[in-house]
Image (tube, rainbow, N blue to C red):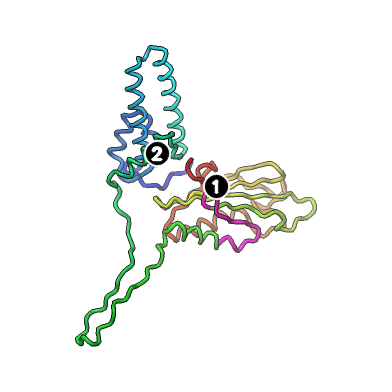
Amino acid sequence: MGKSAAKTTLGLEENIESLLCYAGIWATGLLFLLIEKDNRNVRFHALQSLIVFLGLSVLTFIIGRFSFFGYLLWLATILLWILLMVKAYQGERYKLPKIGDMVESILGRMPSAEPPGPQQPAETVTQEQPASASDAPDTVEAPVSPKPDNKDVVLKAVEQALSAYPQLAVKRGNQTDLEITSIPGAAKEQAGQKKVNYSACLLAREDDRLVLFWEMMKEGGVARDFQPQEISFTAEKNGLNGRKAAGESLDYEQVRVIIENTVKPNGWTFKTVLGKSKAMYPR
């Protein structure tokens, strides 16, 4: 797992701090809620840990640890504790029913600990008063172009970059920002060549300007996940040249490179993830 580019007060990776929010149940939740000033996701996990496990601790004390119902509640607390730590380590902002919405509502009302980002309101350019009042020009409203780090600007730039490849279909998704798939039959297939299907998804997180990218290739009807660090398919073994299907002009590894080279000039960080769920909207 690569390091997360999201900023944290302690300088740790975001998923590590999120896990630690649950590690010491409500005590570490309270601790990270007080010391974490930069990362919204870590603050969410910290407050959720504080509310859930402090409430369960009080309830277990009232019922009685060694009663039958107390034992069941204690067992449920252990299972929930493990689940939340796993989800946090995987980088997922896992919201418990009702409680997760309440946590987000509380954080929304709390004063923001993060320094306000740069704002670019419409600027009013007023020319200096000339010597003659009759020559004074009117006030000019100067239009402001979209911020280069705006999410929609980045997504449109990626769509434009990939539009040069007719083998790919790119569309906005319901569970992620962009879905990228190969178009069957777009490349000329020759006898004996294996068919290759490519799919990928992209999630742009505007709060920390991070693009998460996941990709997969299906070759010969057998799904094979690949990442940049894995060994490329060989031409002798399956008719492929690297990750390029025989007869096609597009090397599928170029998709990742094209996207990375598109988002970075806009001030965004690019990260390839191993799990598809990490490049999809939180559930």
- Nearer mark to the viewer, of 2 and 1: 2
Residue at x-position 68% and y-position 48%: 234
The vertical placement of 65 against 104, above or below, is above
- What separation in Å lies between label 2 and label 1 (alpha carbons)? 28 Å
Tell me which label, 2 or 1, sits earlier in the chain: 2
Residue at x-position 74% and y-position 58%: 188
> Would you say residue 190 is visible in this rendering?
yes
| Residue 175 located within the stretch drawn in magenta | yes
Q: Which residue is mark 2?
A: 101
User: What secondary structure is found at the residue carrying circle 2?
Assistant: helix
Q: Which mark is residue 263?
A: none
Q: Which mark is residue 214?
A: 1
Which residue ends up furthest to the right in the rendered image? 191
Q: Quadrant of residue 48?
A: top left
Q: Residue 143 placed where, x, y %? A: 37, 70
Q: Is residue 34 left or right of residue 210?
A: left
Residue at x-position 40% and y-position 37%: 100
> Would you say residue 17 is visible in this rendering?
no
Which residue ends up furthest to the top in the rendered image? 67
The vertical placement of 265 against 24, above or below, is below
Q: Is residue 85 left or right of residue 166?
A: left
The vertical placement of 193 against 79, above or below, is below
Identify which amino acid the numbered label 2 is placed on. Asp
Question: What residue range appears in magenta?
Answer: 161-177
Q: Residue 23 placed where, x, y %? A: 38, 29
Q: Quadrant of residue 266?
A: bottom left
Q: Residue 230 placed where, x, y %? A: 58, 44
Identify which amino acid the numbered label 1 is placed on. Trp
Q: Residue 161 placed where, x, y %? A: 55, 62
Q: Is residue 214 left or right of residue 30?
A: right
